[in-house]
């Protein structure tokens, strides 16, 4: 069941935005491998890097659930899953070039969370890749640590 929902408009500079534990020291700079770029998902301790198809402002929803959400997967172009440890109880949501002290924070119960990341409208980009109807949603719920995986892979046009 959905407990909380947050909406953001993040500057996805370098085609990415982050969710991270407030006290995490993990660095995603070496995590964006060729495979991570194809999967639109990079990980480091306490950090999730979500790849985007534009490096402009993008709409992002973060949902906190009390159990694994049941969502219609067919309405999304690409879906990934992973886990993240949040020992501080504060999740920072930011574009990768945002000023960290000013970035948005979400308070949660400390612990390990599963994350399912939904990517929609990623086939709607203009020819110059500056405009589009792409949107991103991250659903979080407390759960066991899991290996990252692609639940649904986008079809390249």
Image (cartoon, grey):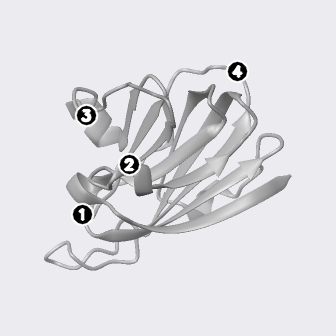
Where residue 116 appears, x then y in whole percent?
Answer: 59, 43
Which residue in the structure is indicated by mark 1?
Answer: 55
**Residue found farthest to the front:** 101
Q: CA distance from mark 4 to mark 1?
A: 32 Å
Estimate the spatial distance between the alpha carbons at disc 3 and disc 2, rounded to whole Å.
20 Å
Residue 32, numbered circle? 3
C-alpha distance separating marks 4 and 3: 24 Å
Binning the other alpha carbons within 10 Å of mark 4 as few (below 14), some (14 to 19) or many (20 upward) gives some
Give the labeled residue for mark 4: 144
User: Can I make out residue 17 in this image?
Assistant: no
Give me the disc on residue 35. none
Mark 1 or 2, nearer chain start: 1
Q: Quadrant of residue 2 in the image?
A: bottom right
Give the structural element (helix, strand or loop) at label 3: loop
- The residue sitting at 54% across, 60% down in the picture is 76
The mark that comes first in sequence, 1 or 3, is 3
**Does 132 appear above or below 8?**
below
Q: Residues within 10 Å of mark 2 (few under 14, many from 20)?
A: few
Label 3 or label 2, whichever lies nearer to me, is 2
Q: Please name whichever residue, 15 or 125, is drawn nearer the observer in this view of the structure.
A: 15
Secondary structure found at label 4: loop
Q: Nearer the viewer, residue 27 or 152?
A: 27
Q: Are marks 4 and 2 in contact (CB under 8 Å)?
A: no
Where residue 22 appears, as percent x and y from the top left, is: 51, 37
Where in the figure is residue 80, as x and y percent of width and height?
50, 41
| Residue 95 vertical position relative to residue 27 in the rendered view, above or below | below
The answer to whether one can see residue 100 in this image is yes
Outermost residue, left side:
128
- Mark 2 sits on what residue? 100
Pointer 1 local density, CA inside 10 Å: few below 14, some 14–19, many at least 20: some
Q: 57 above or below 147?
A: below
């Amino acid at each position: 069941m959905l407990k909380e929902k947050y909406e953001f408009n993040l500057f996805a500079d370098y085609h990415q935005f982050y969710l991270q534990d407030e006290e995490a020291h993990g660095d995603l700079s070496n995590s964006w491998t060729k495979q991570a770029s194809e999967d639109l998902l990079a990980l480091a301790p306490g950090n999730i890097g979500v790849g985007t198809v534009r490096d402009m402002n993008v709409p992002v929803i973060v949902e906190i659930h009390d159990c694994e959400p049941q969502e219609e997967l067919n309405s999304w172009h690409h879906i990934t899953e992973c886990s993240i440890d949040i020992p501080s109880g504060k999740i920072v949501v930011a574009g990768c070039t945002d000023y960290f002290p000013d970035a948005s924070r979400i308070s949660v119960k400390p612990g390990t969370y599963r994350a399912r990341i939904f990517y929609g409208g990623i086939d709607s980009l203009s020819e110059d890749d500056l405009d589009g109807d792409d949107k991103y949603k991250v659903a979080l719920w407390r759960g066991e640590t899991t290996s990252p995986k692609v639940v649904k892979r986008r079809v390249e046009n």
